Amino acid sequence: MTTTFVWTVTSMSTLPSPTPDYVVNVQYNVTGTDTSTPPNVASVQGSATFPVSTTQTTFIPYASLTQAEVLGWIQAEPNVTVNTEACVQGQINSMVTPPISPTVTPLPWATA
C-alpha cells in the first residue's frame, strides 16, 4: 500500500520589519491518502517559526511568495518531512490494522 502526502499552507503570520510582511510563522496541514479501496485518509497540522534575520540580504516580497517556496522553508528543517509524514502514516496504519487495547479483567481470586 502506497501513501500520497499533500502539504498545504493554511496561514502565515508576518512582522513589518526587517521588510514589510516578513514571514515569522507558517501554519500548515499534511494529508496522507493510501491506495486502498476505499482510501484511508489522515492528516496533521503543524506550525513552523522563522526567526527574524538581520543578516539576510535578499527577501521575496510577500505578494510574490508561492506555496511551494514556503513549503520548501518548512521541509528544509531537519526531520520535519520524515517525522510529519510518519505521523500521518501511523494514523493510516491504525485505520488499516486497529490497535488492540487491553481490557481490565477481574482478579481471579476476587469473589463476586
Image (tube, grey):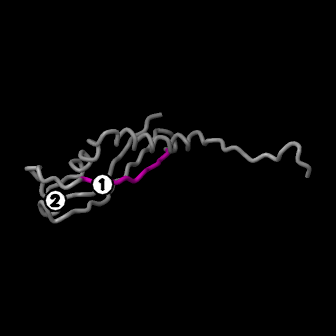
Tell me the kind of residue under disc 2: Tyr
* Residue 95: in magenta span: no
The residue positioned 19% from the left and 55% from the top of the image is 52
Q: Residues within 10 Å of mark 2 (few under 14, many from 20)?
A: few
Q: Quadrant of residue 98?
A: top right
Residue picked out by circle 2: 62
Q: Quadrant of residue 32?
A: top left
The residue positioned 49% from the left and 41% from the top of the image is 90
* Residue 48: in magenta span: yes
Task: Quote the CA–CA distance across marks 2 and 1.
Answer: 14 Å
Seen in the image, is 102 located left or right of residue 95? right
The residue positioned 59% from the left and 39% from the top of the image is 97
Q: Main secondary structure of the magenta part?
A: strand
Over which residues does the magenta segment extend?
Answer: 40-50
Picture coordinates of residue 106 (x, y %)?
A: 82, 47
SS class, disc 1? strand
Picture coordinates of residue 111 (x, y %)?
A: 91, 49
Tell me the kind of residue under disc 1: Val
Q: Which mark is on residue 24? A: none
Q: Residues within 10 Å of mark 1 (few under 14, many from 20)?
A: some
Seen in the image, is 103 located left or right of residue 72? right
> Considering depth in this image, is 88 or 107 the residue closer to the camera?
107
Q: Which mark is on residue 9? A: 1
The residue positioned 31% from the left and 39% from the top of the image is 78
Q: Residue furthest bottom?
A: 16
Picture coordinates of residue 53 (x, y %)?
A: 16, 53
